[in-house]
Every structure is written in structure tokens, then in C-alpha cells.
Amino acid sequence: MDLPSLAVILQAALSPNPDERKAAEQSLNQYQYTPQHLVRLLQIIVDANCDLAVKQVASIHFKNFVAKNWSPHEPDEQQKILPSDKDMVRQNILVFVTQVPPLLRAQLGECIKTIIHADYPEQWPSLLQWVKYNLQQDQQVYGALFVLRILARKYEFKSDEERTPVYLIVEETFPHLLNIFNRLVQIPNPSLEVADLIKLICKIFWSSIYLEIPKQLLDSDVFNAWMILFLNILERPVPLEGQPADPEIRKSWGWWKVKKWTVHILNRLYTRFGDLKLHKPENRAFAQVFQKNYAGKILECHLNLLNMVRVGGYLPDRVTNLILQYLSNSISKNSMYQLLQPRLDVLLFEIIFPLMCFNDNDQKLWNEDPHEYVRKGYDIIEDLYSPRTAAMDFVSEMVRKRGKENLQKFIQFLVEIFRRYDESPAEYKPYRQKDGALLAIGALCDKLKQTEPYKFELERMLVQHVFPEFSSPAGHLRAKAAWVAGQYAHINFADQNNFRKALHSVVSGLRDPELPVRVDSVFALRSFVEACKDLGEIRPILPQLLDEFFKLMNEVENEDLVFSLETIVDKFGEEMAPYALGLCQNLAAAFWKCMNTAEAEDEADDPGALAAVGCLRAISTILESVSRLPHLFVQVEPTLLPIMRRMLTTDGQEVFEEILEIVSYMTFFSPTISLEMWSLWPSMMEALTDWAIDFFPNILVPLDNYISRSTEHFLTCKDPDYQQSLWNVLSSIMTDKNMEDNDIEPAPKLIEVVFQNCKGQVDHWVEPYLRITIERLRRAEKSYLKCLLMQVIADALYYNATLTLGILQKLGVATEVFNLWFQMLQQVKKSGVRVNFKREHDKKVCCLGLTALLALPADQLPGEALEPIFKATLDLLIAYKDQVAEAAKEEEGDDDDMNGFQTDDEEEDDDGSDKEMGVDVEDGDEADSARLQKLAAQAKSFRPTDDDDDDSDEDYSDDEELQSPIDEVDPFVFFMDIVKGMQATDLGQFQNLMQRLDFHYQALASGISQHADQRRAEIEKEKLEKAAAVTS
């Protein structure tokens, strides 16, 4: 397409007629991959005779096409732009970047960034020389700096080898940059264009030194030349002429931007490279020079700049924040603190403290946009720019590092403010100063709680100076009173009436007419709920509390709000049952609202998205708290199903873990798994196949629940065919040669779930699953995966030993499999600890599989195989017995040990004892506790590890809490039943076997026999006790 035709189509793309616009878009898409298309778009962008609106459309298409197609996103993807077109773009784009208006320059800048990231230095070696040449041409300096900024930024966060190109960039360009910088600083009455050039130089310098100082700058003369210029910029006043009147616009004005970047750079040099505690020898020498020659001078300049705040002058918030960060970092350094000390009182009482006080801007925002006031108050990003946060940090650092000489002085200052406030008539009370004093008291909470004499005065301080403000006429003081009360909720109140009064005042704050007071009250309430020893204080008002919570959640999207709700749910546990349905309905509504906000604003980390995650987490907390009340799960299912259904698709990638936890609870605690819940299975399988392999351990949990708790439906349903669906996914994952061992660990666990839960009903699946298991076993490198795969074979033997052995012989792998199995069973570390099959569950599965072989008739099991199998089983049973005993002993010794959430990775010489759930636990409460543990263990235990050491214990995450049908099988009783069967059916073979055993194994067999009798008696006793408990 020629230039005029392309211009016509671009013009049509601006048409008010939607049909014309659509046709133009289709034409552009149709021709976008034709040769020269990209070049012609660039020609239109830079054509002086073209309409600006057309050029803008061209620039947007150009930018989007370059971003999408300049370099392939996949390794096997074909190039979509001809090399000759790329060359043409690279040769021309740099020349034109400065000739186009700022609006178009921004688009071209994005393109240059894409191209530099893809092509420099390999495909664009001439770029650096172009920059160097143009830095020396007065008319081209801006363009050269603009491009150099993009180039330097590519390496800002790169380290080690990836950073190498920076050294050549600095070597070639920094001498010229220094020369330009020097000339710019000397211009009298400089224009705003000069500020733009200096700002670009500052940004280039920042990117180049962010992670490491290039060796050229370690030359003291070169570094000093730069520092003279930065200090010049820092010291000189910002020109008054041309400053915008509006503070919001003024902070982005060129000369204030220059000031900000200068302070930013000096802070970075000081905190990262100017600290004498750094270990790198070259940095240590630099730090000494920086500390000696520059740190104090910068401190002096910073204090002079801050003085503008004291006298009512203007200083942008970000600059104030950065300067206070520098001062905070100076407190711990003796030489710097000595410089700071003479001016500390003025700094503290006339600059820092006023910054902590409620001000005109706060009042304006409070009145005009309380929602924005709340958002800013709880936004971590805002803290990066907030002078108030930096002032609080300075005070905290000062009392932490220099408390001896400053804490008492500062507290006396605050007490004096409290006194003046108390003595003044209402119309003259210093409300804003009181607000600042309360903020300071709250910020110093940790220090005051542990410092005499203050720690003994805290309750009196709250009663005298905080409690009265709960009824203050000033809304901001009511909010601050709630916040401070929350900070001190955990102190030991000598008079419980004071705790009660604070709690009820905070609860009253939930109904305050001012939104910020309600929000601060709800956060303070969380601390009081955590600290409350007698829930009877809160129980009577629980319905009203929840009501206020949901009113607030309708007004404000904030994850901290949901945290507070979670705390209440967690604290009251099953007492939340009457409210569970209402809570879930409200949280579901809040979730949809948050998601809609997040989608509208297209920000994954905005408050709406974060609050959405919080809503799901709170729903999980509620489901856990009512886990012993299955009927409630039936009630909440219709509310939660739409969320689960939608969020198990790609729409839910950001909340996938939280959604899977909810699905896990719903499939585990419901009385039965409904057909509606079964309808989620295909979505999980599709996600696992397409994009969610990282969530395989989380998906394993509900899949296990479906198969183990709704086995009949899993086996009989043919539309969809769940058995076939599971096979399709597992066979695809296990045969994928690109999958790491860690990625596929849940696959053999799922095969185990099928064999153990569907005994006698999936004979046709035994061979296919064994085939893929053995094929993957041959490729497995990590010992944990080898164990899991070998356990699939053990499970298959326990499922049907005759069928499984026949398949292994048919496949010609029986000898190979058993040799590997026995080799793995015998492998030990120097300390004698087993390398493989470390968990109780692993040993038990192997015991059951090997024992099942012993039951085979002589014509199926060769005589020479009988003895090694018998011996291996005895060894495993003894190891299992010891591990169970050790676990019971540990549990007795430490009742607080979270009911056995331990992993095998504590000590190398530890035998890896874990807590198994199903052996002895029959009692009702313990069983419920165990069910919760199962879910917690399922959800938390399958974490990947980067350790490639086959002997590493870290692979052995503890999923002992998983329940399965074999929990009801005692391996000792099972073994002795099989042995008695052998005696009955072939006494000669049995006697022959026993005679061949040495004394050690005969003794083991005798011991196992006695233990089996003991276990029989224990199991019978447990059954009787359980029956009696049910009857009573």
C-alpha cells in the first residue's frame, strides 16, 4: 500500500462513523504484515504536511505493532518483520524522535525501548556511536540524551554478566555527559528546556549507578566533578519565575523534578555505597571517601532545604520524604549524628512534628473526598511519597538508635501539647497538634511498651488523653483515638473496665457519621478482638458488628477491612455458624464488586483486586470455622458456585490458589459432593492442561476429594467420563519430557488415590497407569519422585497382586522393577537413615504392596523371590513401627506442636518421623481436627523445591495428613493375616522359608507377630469406645 492510500485509511480510522472506523481497522490489520508497511507508518508520523491527528493514529499503530511483532515471543515463532524493514526503522527512528511533538515522541520512545531491549548490542551495534556523536552536536543533544536514557534504563536492574554493556556505555558517553552538565549548570537564568536536559542526565546517571558504581566513577577526580554539579543543583534555589501556582502541577514542574532526581541520586549513593559496613573492598574505600568528603555536605544542604517547610515555603512531598530518609539513615552514624545534633531540636519540634500534624490538605480531602482520604491513609505506595510517614520513621529511628538522649525530651514535648490542649477552651484547643501528638504516641508504641517508666504509665495515658477524643467534635481526632487505642490494645490493663471502655468506644466508632472514623475503628477493632480474653464482651454485639462490617465493605474496598473480619471469624470459630450464610453472601457480593472495580481499572494490584483476594480468604476462614457443620456447606454452595465456576477459568489466574482452597473445603466438608460441584471438574482439568501446571499441588486436593468422597459417581458417570478425563491429563503430564520432576509429583499421588479408593473396580486402568509410571520412573532423577512412582506399583500390587504382577511380566519389566525397589529400600545415608520412603505413609504403602505379593500362590511367585520379599517387608514393618512410636512420643512431649505439622528435614540423623493421621485417631473431635489437618496439609504441603540433590530431605513435604482407605488397614495385622494364610495353604513352603531365615529375621518375625496381636486388641478397644461414645 502506497503512502497516500495509507494516509486515507488512517484518516478513516478517525471517522465518527463506526462502520468506516471498523473498515479502516480491518484494512490496517490486513496490510500490517506486508513489506514496507512499518516504514510507511514511520514516514507518515514524521511527515510535516500530514494532519497531527492522522500522525497520532499512525504512531499508536506503529507502537503497538513494534511491541507485538519486533521480536518473536516464542522460541519457534517466525519473524513477522523483514530484516530490511527493521534496518530502515533503526536507521531513521533516532533522527526523527526529537523532531516530532511530545505526544508522538512518547510513542516513538516506547518503540525505541522495545527495539533496544531486543536488539542492543548484537543487532544494533551502531547505536552507542550514534549517541556519542550526537552528544557532541549542540542541536542534537536532547535526542541523544533521550535515547541514552532509554538505553541506560535497560540495564538499571541488571547484575553480573548481564550488566557488562553498561561499562562501555559509561566509558563512551559519561565524559560528554559531564561536559554538557557542566555547561548547563553555568547558564544564567536558565530556561525550562535546560531543566529537561539536566533531568535526563540525572536519570541516566541514576540508572547507571542503581545497582553498582561503574569503575570509571570510582576515579576520585571524575566522581568529584559529578558531585560538585549535583551539590550545585542541590544548593541553588529553584527559579521562582514560571512556577505553577497549583501545588499538584508544581511538583511535576521541570526544576522541581531536577531537585527530586538530585536528592534521589545522593540518597542512593549514601545508602547503598556510602555505608562503611559494606563488605566489598572497592566499595569500602569509596564509602570512606564519600563519608569524609560528601555525606556531611549533603546533610547540611538537606537541612537547609527542609528549612523551607519551617518557614512556610514550598517543598514537594517526595523531596521532603527523600530528605527525611537521608536524615533517618544518618542517625546511627556517629559522625553524621554529631553534625545533626546542634540542629536536632529545631528539626524535631519545628519541622518533623508539624509534618505529623493534621493539616489543611488533610482537612480538604477529608471534607471533599473521604474515600480518597481513606485510600491514601492505607496505601503502601502513598507511604513512599508521604512526608508524614517519613517523619514517623525518623522519630522511630531516633528513639531506637538515640533514645537515651532524645526519648524523654520528645515525650515531654508531647505531654506539654496534651497539657495545653486540656487547659484550652474548646474553641482554642490545638486540635491538629493533639492529632500529631497522638500519631507520635502510636508510632512509638513498641518503644514505650518496653521502656521504663513509660510502660507503667500507658493505661493512664490512654484514659487521660485518648479516651476523651472518642467523643471529640473533630472527626480526625475521633479517628486518631481509635487508631491509637488499637495500637495499645494488647497492653495489660490493670483495670479491665478500661479495656472494656476502649473496646466499646471503638465499636461505637463503627457507627460514626464520618467514613474515616468508621474505617479506623474497624481496624482498631481487630486488635481488640485479638487481645480480648473474654469473648463475652463482644458476643452480645456480634450481629451488629457484622452488620456494620458489611455496610463499610459496601462503601470501601480495602483488604485490611477483610483481615479484621477474618480475625473475628477466627476468634469465634463455630459460634459463627448462625452468621455463616449471611457472611458468605455478603463476602461474595463484595468480591464481585471488587472484581468489577479491578477490571474497570485494569490494575492487578489496585485496592479492589487486593480486597477481592481478601474476600476469598475470609470465605475460606468461615468455611474452616464451621467445618463440623456439614449442612451449612449445602446452604452456602449456591452463593459460592458462580465465583468458583468463573474463577476456575483464566479470569481467575490472580486468585486461583484462593479459589482452589474454597473448592477443597466445599468438596471435603459437604455431606455429599453435588452434581453442581462435579461440574467444576472439567474447568480444573482444562486449566491444568492449558496454563495451571504451577497449581497442580493445589488442584490435587479437590481432585482427591472428588475421587475419595464421591467414588461411585467418579466410576459410573460417562458424560463426562471422569476416569478418561483424569487419564488424559495424567498421561499427558507424565509423558511430557519437558516437565521437571517437581512439576509432576502430584500425578503419581492421584494414581494412588484411584487405586486405593476404587479397589476391584478399575482393573482396565491398571496396565495403562503402570506403563506411564514405569516409563517415567526410568527418566526420574529426584529420589522423592522415584519413591512416589514406586509407590504407584506398590498400590497396584495391593489393589490386585495377581493382575499387577502379570502386567509387569507381560511388559518384561518385573525383574527391573523389583531390583530397583529393593535397591531403593536398602539405600541408607552414612548415619543409617533411609534415603528413600521416609514418611510413615511411604513405608506403609510399600509394606502393603510387598505383603500382597506374599499371598500369591507358589505358581505365580517364584520361590527365590519369596525370601527377599519377606525380609524386606519385615525390615519395613520394624522401621514403620519405630517411626510411629517416635511420632507418638514427640506428640506427647509437645502438645502445642500444631498436631504434628513437621517435615522430615530437621536433622540428617533423624529418621524422618511424621505424624500419621489414620492409624489410631477414631475419637470424634480428633477426627474432625484430623479432617482440618488433612486440608491444611493438602493445601500447604506440596511446595516445589529448587534443590537438585537427590538426598535432600526438602523434597519430602509432609502430606502424612492425607486420608485414604488404607488408614483403616493396620500393616502388622494385614501382614500376620497373610502369613497365617500362607501357613494354611502351603505349610511346606512356609516352613522352608522360616528355616532359611537367620536368627535376626526370625526374631523380627516373632516380634511383629506379638505387635500384631497387641494392635488387634487396641483396634478392638477403640471400636468399642467409639461405639459407646456414639450410643451416649
Image (spheres, helix red, strand yellow):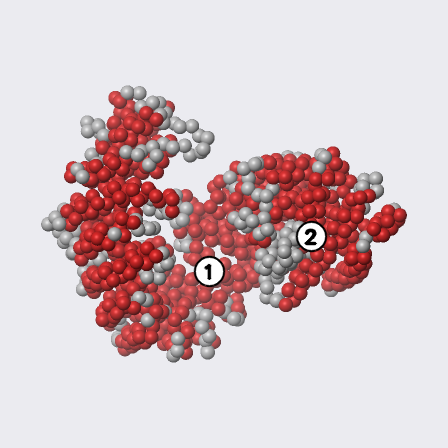
Query: Which one is in front, 254 or 822?
Result: 822
In this picture, residue 910 sits left or right of residue 404? right
Circle 1: element type: helix
The quarter in which the C terminus is drawn is bottom right
Say what amino acid the circle numbered 1 marks. Answer: Ser
Q: Residues within 10 Å of mark 1 (few under 14, many from 20)?
A: many
Task: Of the two numbered discs 2 and 1 on the same chain, state the one appearing first in sequence.
Answer: 1
Rendered residue at 69%/50% (across/down): 826
Question: How many numbered marks does the figure carry?
Answer: 2
Q: Can see residue 755?
A: no
- Find the residue positioned furthest to the left: 188
Give the quarter of the figure containing the N terminus: top left
Quickly name the residue at label 2.
843
Q: Is residue 480 above or below residue 136?
A: below
Location of residue 413 by image quarter: bottom left
Q: Are marks 2 and 1 in contact (CB under 8 Å)?
A: no
Residue 735: % across, % down = 60, 36
Separation of residues labelled 2 and 1 (CA atoms) = 44 Å
Say which quarter of the image contains residue 933: bottom right
Say which quarter of the image contains residue 30: top left
Image coordinates for residue 880, horizontal then vertical, percent: 70, 56
Residue corresponding to mark 1: 564
Q: Position of residue 219 (x, y in %)?
A: 25, 52
**Depth check: 286 or 1005 in front?**
286
User: Residue at left 80%, top 42%?
Assistant: 861
Tag 2: amino acid: Lys
Residue 1022, visible in the rendered structure = yes
Against 39, is 922 above or below? below
For the point 76% across and 48% down, which residue is it? 869
Q: Is residue 591 above or below residue 1024?
A: above
Rendering coords of residue 255 (x, y %): 19, 50
Indicate whether 151 appears above or below 628. above
